[in-house]
Amino acid sequence: MTRSISPTIAPVLLCAALLAACSKQQQDAAPTAAAPASAPASAPAASAASTAAPPDFTALVRKVGPAVVNVVTTRNARQTPAQMAPGDPMLEYFRRFMPQQPPGGGQEAPGGGIGSGFIIDAQGHILTNAHVVAGADEVQVRLADSKREFKARVVGIDPQTDVALLKVDAQDLPTATLGDSSKLQPGEWVAAIGSPFGFANTITAGIVSATERALPDEMLVPFIQTDVAVNPGNSGGPLLNVRGEVIGINSQIYSRTGGYMGLSFAIPIGLAMEVADQLRTEGRVTRGRLGIGIQEVSPELAQSFKLNEPRGALVTSVEPNGPAQRGGIAIGDVILSVNQQPVRDAGDLPRIVARTKPDTQVQIEVWRNGASQTLNATMGEMPSTAPPPARPEPAGGMQSPGANQLGIVVSELPPQGRRVLGVPYGLVVQGVQSASARSPLQPGDVIIGVNNQPFANLEEFNRHVSQAAPGSTLALLVRRGDANLYVPIPVGKG
């Protein structure tokens, strides 16, 4: 499944930073003070809670601290991404967690890193982040209670959720108690235990800032956002509630500097355990797939499709002969639920679909032509990698005689461009009138539908536009780059 919506967090403000320390054995580096735990704002003076003291975490540390481990990795010289064969699973790791990796040849120097993890059962299974152990030639686990150290086996990693499962052969291991991340609420006190900058069993505390937070390019994880101070080395460590139960795995921060700036993100433990169970029993993670592209339903698009409110996921593309097409899903449908699980916005759908087993038949409620209907589809399986679609470069064609009621100037997509896009006809946006300068259309967009209606020539397109009432909104189906999306355009008075 692909998603053709823009990230909701402006990249100009924040940049993703890994929490794992990927330099050589940072535990031997000169001590660097870890950022202190941030303190949430106090409640209003009129509240009875204003006099309550913050929770005492000493019992929590005694209970969970022994089950938190240091994960130390070593890595020999190896290939760079440019030298890897297509389909190599390590390419996904480099794409997600080392995007600035230079494209040139050569060998990586030997090195290592350190992160955190926690023991989840007496058999010696340990949860950590995939990016902590990905590419490691050897993984060592150090316990905090008696300084015991064991060589760990990587049972499996899942780069798409950043979860890894390790196994050590040992007895009398302390274990962490797992909680229910689905019951977590913003405002709750939470704490993290890990090894920031190599300082083992460091605890920091804060509150839950948000739940089910979507991050750019992270479609499958509904992150827990907190203001708990986490830093390089905290990766893979537990996020705990005040009862000492693990409710998340610390995974990412957002920062201008690479260090803590008040925004940290954890993988919900419920999702992490689903992944870990599959890694333990099957050695890999399988996910459902529909084979569609989607986007958010804005208020303007909701009006165009006669929805009473902006909700659901708007289908912008359907893979030929894919699971969705075989189930009757079409471009322009708004998916409202899957097996009665509501799709509140477009970000919900990839997570619901991914957590559904392949070959499972599901009921999908869609909004089509101003009414709700239920379709039956059988889930496909999400591949580990997928080739990017061809990027069209339309040019030329017959020029529109002038801007229409939409305030745009278009030209016909030439036959070669139609073959590349796989469409019978399209219009290339050449420009936008100054009066419509705030139009969401961009030069180079290819218009292929109007309110779910195709058109075979420029005259038909202009006729669709002329039939729209002034002041109403048209939903134009547009191909932009590699993806389809619907663009709401207000109709002027001509």
Image (cartoon, rainbow, N blue to C red):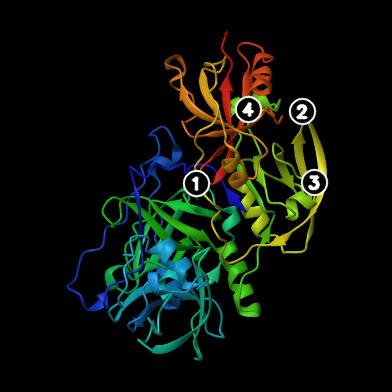
User: Which of disc 3 and disc 4 is earlier in sequence?
Assistant: 3
CB-based contact (under 8 Å), mark 4 and mark 3: no
Q: CA distance from mark 4 to mark 2?
A: 14 Å
Secondary structure beneath dot 1 equals loop
Name the residue carrying label 2. 370
Q: Residue 421 location in percent, x, y?
A: 60, 44
Q: CA distance from mark 1 to mark 4?
A: 36 Å
Name the residue carrying label 4. 475
Q: Give the amino acid type for the residue marked by disc 2 in the picture.
A: Gly
Q: Nearer the viewer, mark 1 or mark 4?
A: 4
Q: Could you tell me if residue 296 is visible in this image?
A: yes
Name the residue carrying label 1. 186
Left or right: 323 with respect to 253?
Answer: right
Name the residue carrying label 3. 328
**Which residue is at a point 42% across and 89% down the rendered structure image?**
150
User: Which of disc 2 and disc 4 is earlier in sequence?
Assistant: 2
Q: Residue 58 location in percent, x, y?
A: 38, 66
CB-based contact (under 8 Å), mark 2 and mark 1: no
